[in-house]
Image (tube, rainbow, N blue to C red):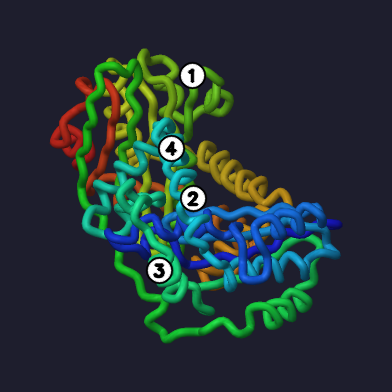
Amino acid sequence: MPTATVGVWIDAGSRYENEKNNGTAHFLEHMAFKGTRKRSQHDLELEVETIGAHLNAYTSREQTVYYAKCFEQDLERAVEILADILLNSVYGKQEIERERGVILREMEEVEQNMQEVVFDHLHEGVFRGTPLARTILGPVKNIKSITREDLVAYITKYYKGPRMVLAAAGGVEHEYLVSLAQKYFGHIERGTDEVLQYEPGNFSPSYHLIPNANMDMAYGTLVVEGTSWTHPDNIPMQLANTLIGNFDRTQSAGLITPSRLARRMELSDGVHSFMSFTTSYKDTGLSGIYFTAEEQGLRTISEAVCTEWKRLAEEVDENELERAKKSLYTNMLLMLDGSTPICEDIGRQLLCYGRRISIPELELRIMGVNTNTIKDIARRYFLNRPVGFTVIGPTKNWPRAEEIAKWLRT
């Protein structure tokens, strides 16, 4: 390929923060392109534009990522710029003050995205008392009070060798990348073994209704504890969620090869969409359903999901499972279409698994799941387990927690 993507994946996100500095990892991402000891912000932007490259960054609960997309011949320059940004940023007080306003505006935008709002409230409930409960952006009071010292302290503690992966894909030779890593990142401090420690994210039952009679639609999620990235049940759990499927009344999504749940929702009133999902972290995860519904559809969707979870523990159609396996495998391959997603896959997997799972191994793991595996997964994860839910909007029709527990009891 004539282009390449190169980036640094860092095992440092909001779960490594405390109440006082929550929001620091995301704040650092914002400060990354604001000037280094060698380049001013203007110089940095001009240099990146001159070589036709793209610089970007993002923060999640567990990772912070800085990456560049460039022409093959500019790979060394891109790595040097990334190293400069990560290791020599100035974090000027004036720039910090300016970014506070930018982050506060970003927070206002996030608050308009109901899916983000629902998932933030869900994490706050099911992971309460642990760092996974905190939002990525942090509370307003922290954004207004985070100092340069807080930013530098976070970098000093977490931007260490064992937590960082330099990954590239596209027009790049592996040995060449290794030489660039030694040249520009070779002096990074390794730190002690304690550098990789983290506080566990324990799942707790959580029942959170946020009534708002002015909204004409309810947005919500119903979940159980899922699997970590490395858990042997991770792939079967993703297949179980593929079987449950998704549905969107406005786009006919999920209706071409519909799941049983999608077929049922198509015939019911009041449910507009649902999306089955699984989210994984280092040591835990969430598995469940996100939905949008009118008030009269809340009981319908909650009862239907519980019925489907229960049915998966008793009967799994072999043909449907084969379709789900092909669908999951295809989607995973489609997500690797281009140097940027491949680079992202390498960086994330090295942090999560300590290695990259090859495509043939991934296919074997997916295709090796049978109907008994899915039934076993459903019994162990969906039934007789603590649940969590968050529903925002007209919530009057949502069933009580005791009723949901009864539906999922065997």
Labels in figure, total: 4
Q: Earlier in the sequence, mark 4 or mark 2?
A: 2
Q: Nearer the viewer, mark 1 or mark 4?
A: 4
Q: Which residue is outermost to the left?
A: 402
Crowd band around label 2 with a 10 angstrom C-alpha radius: few (<14), some (14–19), many (20+): some
Q: Which mark is residue 266?
A: none
| 317 vs 216, nearest the viewer | 216
List the residue tagged with mark 2: 99
Q: Which mark is residue 249?
A: 1
List the residue tagged with mark 4: 110
Quadrant of the image occupied by residue 315? top left
Residue 384 as seen in the image, left or right of residue 196: left
Residue 63 as seen in the image, left or right of residue 130: right
- Disc 4 + disc 2, Cβ < 8 Å: no
Crowd band around label 4 with a 10 angstrom C-alpha radius: few (<14), some (14–19), many (20+): some
Q: Is residue 316 above or below residue 188?
A: above
Let me know if residue 267 appears in the view: yes
Q: Amino acid at mark 1?
A: Arg
Let me know if residue 233 appears in the view: no
Q: Earlier in the sequence, mark 3 or mark 1?
A: 3
Crowd band around label 1 with a 10 angstrom C-alpha radius: few (<14), some (14–19), many (20+): some
Quadrant of the image occupied by residue 227? bottom left
Q: Which mark is residue 149?
A: 3
Q: Amino acid at mark 2?
A: Glu
Q: Earlier in the sequence, mark 1 or mark 4?
A: 4
Residue 210 as seen in the image, left or right of residue 63: left
Residue 196, position as x, y percentages in the image:
41, 76
- Disc 3 + disc 2, Cβ < 8 Å: no
Residue at image location 49% in from the left, 41% down from the top = 242
